[in-house]
Image (cartoon, grey):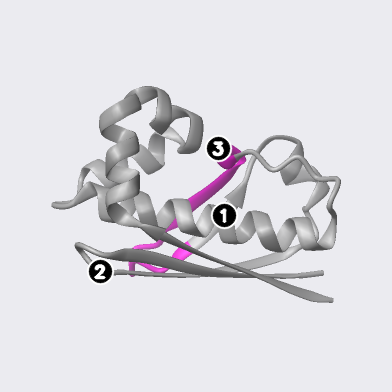
Amino acid sequence: MIKVGVDIVKIDRIENMIEKYGRRFLEKNFTSAEIDYCNSKAYPCQHFAGKFAAKEAVKKALLSLNPTLMVLMRNVEVKNGIDGIPCIELHGALKEICKDYCIEVSISHEKNGYAVAMAMVAI
């Protein structure tokens, strides 16, 4: 069975959340590795928005398979390989529950507009 999820985020919405709530917003939604990665970029908000969209897309795909799952944003980590290709690592109870799932994600963004992500989950 294959399920998909998609999400689109306005980059300045994420920028406003970071300005308004600061570390509290970041630490609620991103791992420390994600925060470090995004902050290392010239335009961090673009990367935060892309990762946020990816997490939401993964969440939608997972919940379409199992609506009783508790999917916290920090338990869905978006990592980047050397080539920049994103991959998903799950944490907490979600990691064990979904250990046999194959999760793929794709992210696209433009500097002053939107970030979009699509996720596919196969079991």
Residues drawn in magenta: 73-86
The residue at which mark 1 appears reads as 56
Residue 3: assigned label: none
Please give left or right for residue 116 compared with residue 35 in the image. Answer: right
Mark 3 residue crowding within 10 angstroms, few (<14) / some (14–19) / many (20+) = some
Q: Position of residue 101 (x, y in %)?
A: 76, 62
Q: Residue 109 is drawn in which quadrant?
A: bottom left
Mark 3: which amino acid?
Arg
- Separation (CA) of disc 2 from disc 1: 18 Å
Q: Secondary structure at mark 2?
A: loop
Please give left or right for residue 91 compared with residue 26 in the image. Answer: right
- Separation (CA) of disc 3 from disc 2: 24 Å
Q: Earlier in the sequence, mark 2 or mark 1?
A: 1
Mark 2: which amino acid?
Glu
Q: Position of residue 71 (x, y in %)?
A: 69, 43
Q: Residue at x 85, y 55 (%)?
A: 66
Q: Earlier in the sequence, mark 3 or mark 1?
A: 1
Q: Position of residue 10 (x, y in %)?
A: 35, 57
Residue 110: assigned label: 2
- The nearer-to-camera label among 3 and 2 is 2
Q: Residue 110 is drawn in which quadrant?
A: bottom left
Residue 74: assigned label: 3
Please give left or right for residue 106 compared with residue 110 in the image. Answer: right
Mark 2 residue crowding within 10 angstroms, few (<14) / some (14–19) / many (20+) = few
Q: Position of residue 42 (x, y in %)?
A: 13, 52
Q: Secondary structure at mark 3?
A: helix
Q: Residue at x 78, y 53 (%)?
A: 98
Compared to residue 75, the image places residue 67 above or below, namely below
Q: Earlier in the sequence, mark 3 or mark 2?
A: 3
